[in-house]
């Protein structure tokens, strides 16, 4: 098959990667499947029938260059992103093609902004990290809620997950982050990431109906503490997680997600509720849908489509809220995502 204008999915055989491949194909993109395991890639290609395979390891720059040769863009779905992010974005910049990833790791996203922003700007090449449920969706909701505001005193993002059955990749990435922090916790306050040893605590959060009031683990910190402050003047970003989901994630025996429909989604549902406060004024935005891994596919594929069409607000390295018209982007995700935004 022709690979002209094809999109490379690095980590195509992973749980999220397979959703991304399916969504790209559904929307008419040619796909090049890449990653470390040639046998699994060939099995995926046999299953899909119209997917080109180009194996490559992140420790082999030449193989990465060959995997990206002639492609239109690359989506990195291979965690831990602390390992894969740097090599794959550097290969994308060498190839002069847009790079997007679905990283939820706080430190990996912080490193992406710190280490690659200058090169991406110099190359005038779009680089969009955390274009996923964590980091991307919250950033889009915050940006849409703020509207004409350029800053806020407080940003809160509450994750109302019915459950959280983590994939092996999620567990591996979490372990890498835990080790990088030496077991410490992290928050974004006073305009900076802060590492601390405070114990987790719970509070009630009033989610939109029908979820209603639920107990959440306060300061259950996710990648939004990197993406939101990357382009908005905010002094405090706090993310919170429903207690049930946090317990699932912590449980060693919690099984991986199990498909319940033809799209491969699990029965997990979610509501993401955003509150921004500035000068005594409060604004809210929310989104609801099914399966946090599956929803990442329409998020990142819509981003690919807009980047390739030139429907961007900036160039170089930027988060979802800075790269795109946030409200328009969110509304375009129907029927995958239902959103409520300020008028």
Image: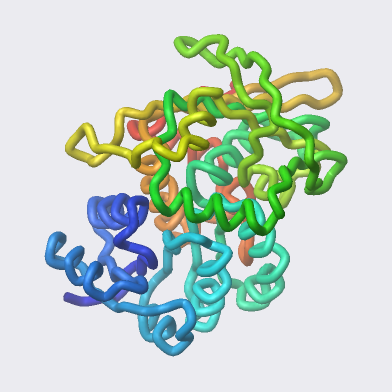
Q: In the rendered view, tell whether residue 46 sits above or below residue 325.
A: below
Q: In which quarter of the image is residue 146?
A: top right
Q: In the rendered view, tell whether residue 309 sits above or below residue 277.
A: below
User: What residue do we see at 15% from left, 60% from top?
Assistant: 48
**Which one is nearer the viewer's eye here, 280 or 101?**
101
Q: Is residue 292 left or right of residue 131?
A: left
Q: Can residue 68 be seen in this view?
A: yes
* Image quadrant containing the N terminus: bottom left
* Image quadrant containing the C terminus: top right
Residue at the front extreme of this rendering: 253
Q: In the rendered view, tell whether residue 300 sits above or below residue 237.
A: below
Q: In this view, does 68 lie to the left or right of 88?
A: left
Q: In which quarter of the image is residue 112?
A: bottom right
User: What residue do we see at 29% from left, 54% from top?
Assistant: 18
User: What residue do we see at 36% from left, 51% from top?
Assistant: 16
Q: In this view, does 206 lie to the left or right of 238?
A: left
**Which one is nearer the viewer's eye here, 323 or 256?**
256
Q: Is residue 333 visible?
A: no
x, y percentage for residue 12?
A: 32, 62
x, y percentage for residue 6?
A: 31, 70
**Which one is nearer the viewer's eye here, 134 or 171?**
171
Q: How is the image coloured?
A: rainbow
x, y percentage for residue 49?
A: 12, 65
x, y percentage for residue 206?
A: 60, 13
User: What residue do we see at 45% from left, 63% from top?
Assistant: 76
How many numbered marks appear?
A: 0
Q: In this view, does 199 lie to the left or right of 239?
A: right
């Amino acid at each position: 098959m022709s690979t002209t204008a094809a999109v490379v999915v690095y980590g195509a055989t992973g749980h999220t990667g397979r959703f991304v491949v399916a969504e790209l194909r559904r929307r008419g993109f040619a796909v090049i499947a890449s990653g470390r395991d040639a046998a699994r890639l060939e099995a995926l290609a046999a299953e899909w029938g119209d997917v080109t395979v180009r194996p490559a390891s992140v420790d082999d720059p030449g193989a990465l260059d060959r995997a990206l040769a002639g492609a239109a863009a690359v989506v990195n779905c291979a965690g831990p992103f602390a390992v894969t992010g740097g090599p794959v974005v550097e290969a994308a910049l060498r190839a002069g093609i847009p790079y997007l990833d679905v990283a939820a790791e706080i430190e990996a996203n912080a490193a992406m902004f710190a280490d690659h922003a200058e090169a991406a700007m110099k190359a005038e090449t779009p680089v969009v990290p955390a274009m996923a449920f964590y980091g991307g969706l919250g950033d889009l909701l915050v940006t849409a809620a703020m509207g004409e505001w350029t800053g806020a005193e407080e940003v809160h993002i509450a994750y109302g997950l019915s459950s959280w059955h983590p994939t092996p990749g999620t567990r591996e990435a979490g372990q890498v982050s835990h080790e990088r922090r030496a077991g410490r916790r992290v928050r974004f306050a006073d305009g900076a990431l802060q590492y601390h040893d405070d114990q987790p605590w719970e509070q009630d959060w009033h989610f939109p109906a029908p979820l209603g009031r639920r107990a959440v683990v306060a300061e259950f910190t996710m990648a939004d503490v990197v993406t939101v402050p990357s382009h908005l003047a905010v002094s405090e970003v706090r993310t919170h997680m429903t207690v049930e989901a946090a317990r699932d994630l912590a449980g060693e025996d919690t099984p991986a997600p199990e498909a319940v429909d033809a799209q491969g989604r699990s029965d997990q549902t979610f509501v993401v509720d955003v509150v921004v406060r500035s000068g005594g004024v409060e604004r809210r935005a929310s989104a609801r849908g099914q399966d946090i891994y599956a929803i990442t596919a329409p998020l990142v594929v819509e981003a690919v489509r807009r980047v390739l069409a030139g429907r961007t607000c900036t160039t170089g390295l930027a988060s979802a809220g800075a790269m795109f018209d946030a409200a328009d982007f969110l509304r375009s995700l129907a029927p995958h995502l239902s959103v409520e935004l300020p008028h």
